[in-house]
Amino acid sequence: MSNEFDRYADTYDQLLDGSIPDALRENAYFAEYKVALMARRLRMASIKSILDFGCGLGRSLFFMHQYFPDAELYGFDLSPLSLDLAKRKMPQVTLTTKWSEISSIKYDCIFAANVFHHIPKEERKLAMVNCHNLLAQDGHFFLFEHNPFNPITRRIFERCPFDQDAEMLFKSEVEALANLAELMVVDSAYTLFFPKQMAFLRGFEPALRRLPIGAQYYVELAKA
Ligand SMILES: C[S@@+](CC[C@H](N)C(=O)[O-])C[C@H]1O[C@@H](n2cnc3c(N)ncnc32)[C@H](O)[C@@H]1O
């Protein structure tokens, strides 16, 4: 049976680009931004293994390889075709659609970017519990999501073909889900306030982090 994202694997980047206004097309910039943010947060931690949960085409894994050169990288996704494409770019990464192939490891870090809004509402708690179970006792779980409060994010979301069946989550919903899965919130903030052309303003982001107008947000979680 073909996976929903298999339909889009070949054209994922073009479809995403087509949904985003010209001035904001910068998929790689967004992917690196998130990995760099995670690397800053983890600069004191010893990270030997990272799982990219819902890794898609491996865009974040590409940057994780640069920012965490000593870490063993793993990617899990339900779309075999996306993983085939990711494997071409990242042959050194363990990529799988089979939970059994990643579930015997406890990860120092789990990263999930724009995955939970694709998981049906009734399955999100289980997905969060599964991530909890894969996390090392002192591990770090970074979850990035679209910010439904941001009108430009909403517009892109509504135009994006592979978001048709998806449903965005508010930051408070992620925090409530985490709580149900016995994960505690270590930090959370709104992010991506400025497009690439205005990257010189990024120094202001820490001061804006509580304002619910960033294009996305992150929640950093740990075992309670
Ligand atoms: C919008 S894409 C994001 C891909 C990648 N994280 C990124 O930032 O480029 C969402 C991905 O989540 C995957 N996905 C959806 N539901 C999932 C689930 N329950 N478990 C793992 N991956 C899932 C999809 O197959 C798709 O590749």
Image: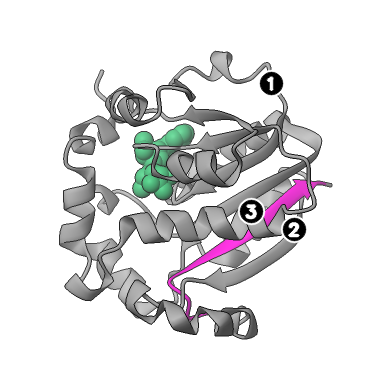
Question: Closer to us: mark 2 or mark 1?
Answer: 1
Residue at image point 21% right, 38% down:
8
Instruction: Give SS at disc 1.
Output: loop
Question: Closer to us: mark 2 or mark 3?
Answer: 3
- Which comes before the other along the chain, label 2 or label 3? 3
Q: Please tell me which residue lies in front, 170 or 42.
A: 42
Is residue 111 at least partly visible in the picture? yes
- Residue 217 falls inside the magenta stretch: yes
- Please, what is the three-letter code of the amino acid marked with disc 1? Ile
- CB at disc 1 and ligand 1 closer than 8 Å: no
- Please, what is the three-letter code of the amino acid marked with disc 3? Ala
Residue at image point 43% right, 70% down:
148
Q: Which residue is mark 1?
A: 105
Range drawn in magenta: 211-223
Is residue 179 at least partly visible in the picture? no
Q: Which residue is mark 2?
A: 185
**Do the residues bearing badges 1 and 3 touch, measured as CB atoms within 8 Å?**
no
Seen in the image, is 142 located left or right of residue 90?
right
- Which comes before the other along the chain, label 2 or label 1? 1
Q: Please tell me which residue lies in front, 127 or 136.
A: 136
Write down which quadrant ligand 1 falls in. top left
- Residue 149 falls inside the magenta stretch: no
